[in-house]
Amino acid sequence: MLVSLQLGSLISPAYACGCGAMVPGKDSQVSVDRETSVVDWDGRTEQIVMRLTVRGNAPEAAWIMPVPNRASVELGDSGLFSELSAITAPEHVTRHYFWPRSHDWPFSDSGNVGDGAAAPWAGAPSVEVVGRERLGPFDVARLAATDPQALEQWLEENGFDLPDRLATALKPYVDQKWEYVAIRLAPRESSTPLVGTLDPLRLRFASDRLVYPMRLSKLASTPQQLGLYILAPHRMEPRGPIGGDAPEVTYAGRIDPRSAADDTDALEKLTGADPVFLTAIEQSFPHPERIDGDHQLRATADDTPYRTKVYENRLLTVGDIPVWVLSLLAAALVAATAVLLLVLRARRPRPVPVG
C-alpha cells in the first residue's frame, strides 16, 4: 500500500497535483494543498485511495488521473488515513544532557529549570466513455483515448481549458495505451468555491507491477513534496529519483492490519487480514519540470525494519533539581570536608619528644 502525500500550491492556474492533473474552469483558480493516496498492491491488483484538500475560487474543476488498465471507481473510507497516520508516527525518544544550555537556568531569563452538484458530462466522438458513476460529490467518468488531442477536445467540450503542456504530457500514457479517470469536482452548493478536504475516492485496476503515476507533476509551478506509504509483501523502494531528490525512508516494518489503531477497520477492509510490509518514503521535487517518468517500485534485498525517531533533549535532573547543580554541591561539600580535615589536622597538638 502506498500513501502519497503531495503538497504544493497551483497558481494562475497550474495543472498538476501529485499523480494527476487538476484543471479549473475558465477565469478561476484552484490549488491542491495536500494530496494523500493509499495504494494496496498484491502483485496482481493495485488499489489507490486518494483524498484531496483543495482551495481556490473555482466553483468546479476536473481532475484527471492516468491508469495502466481499466479501473473501477468508488468512494473510499476516510478512516484509512487516520489508521496509517497512527501506524507510521515517529517514535519519540528522550535524550538527557548534563551541563545547562542557553535555554536553561542560569542562562535563560525565565528562571525555569529543565523545561523542555455537477453538470453532466458532454459526449465527444473521439473519446470512449467506458464507465460513469455519481459518487457523493463527484461525477466520475472513465475514459479511453487514442491520442492526447482527443482527451483535450473532450475536456474543452465539458467547459474546461486544457493547456498545451498537459496535452503533451499525456502523450506517453497514450502511447502505452493507458486509460484515464476523469472526475468533476464540485461543492454541494454550486455557487460555493472548492475548499477543504474532499471525500476520498478508491480506484482499482489490474497491474503486475507497482507503479505510481507522477509524470504530470512536471507541470507544477511550485516545488512538490511527495510521501509514499507502500504496503506490499516486502519492503519496497523506487527504482530511481525520477528527477527529484533522493527518496528517504521514514518507516519500514511488517504490520498486522487487524491491530490498526483506528476503530474503522478500514485498513483491514482494503488489504485483508494477513500481515503486510509497510514502507514509508518521502521525496522532494524542488524542480518539478525535471520529473521524467512515473515511480516504479521494487522489493529491496531484505526486509530490514526502520522507524523514524524524534529526539527530545532534556536537562538531566533529580526531581526538579539539575544533576549538575547537585554535582557541584557535592564537589563543594567534598572540598569543604577536605579543607576542614586539613585544618583540624594542623591544629592537632604534636607530641613532645622524650629526651
Image (spheres, grey):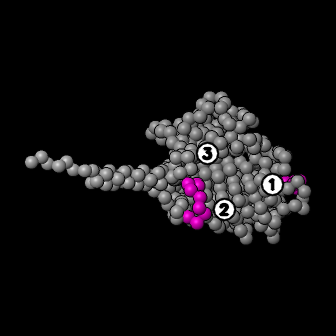
Between marks 3 and 1, how big is the CA–CA gap?
A: 33 Å
Q: Quadrant of the N terminus?
A: top right
Image depth: mark 3 or mark 2 in front? 3
The front one of 212 and 10 is: 10
**Residue 33, quarter of the rendered image:** bottom right
Q: Which residue is at a point 74% across and 55% down the rendered structure image?
A: 53
Between marks 3 and 2, how big is the CA–CA gap?
A: 22 Å
The front one of 94 and 260 is: 94
Q: Which residue is at a point 65% across and 55% down the rendered structure image?
A: 6
What is the x, y in percent for residue 139?
Answer: 83, 50
Crowd around label 3: few <14 · some 14–19 · many ≥20 (10 Å)? some
Q: Amino acid at mark 3?
A: Ala
Image depth: mark 2 or mark 1 in front? 2
Q: Tag count in the figure?
A: 3
Which numbered disc covers residue 184? 1
Between marks 2 and 1, how big is the CA–CA gap?
A: 21 Å
> Quick check: is 115 in the magenta stretch?
yes
Q: Amino acid at mark 1?
A: Arg
Which numbered disc covers residue 318? none
Q: Which stretch appears magenta? A: 108-130
What is the x, y in percent for residue 319?
Answer: 55, 46
Q: Which residue is mark 3?
A: 89
Q: Which residue is at a point 71% across and 68% down the rendered structure image?
A: 11
Which numbered disc covers residue 8? 2
Crowd around label 1: few <14 · some 14–19 · many ≥20 (10 Å)? many
**Is most of the magenta stretch helix, strand or loop?**
loop
Secondary structure at badge 2 equals loop
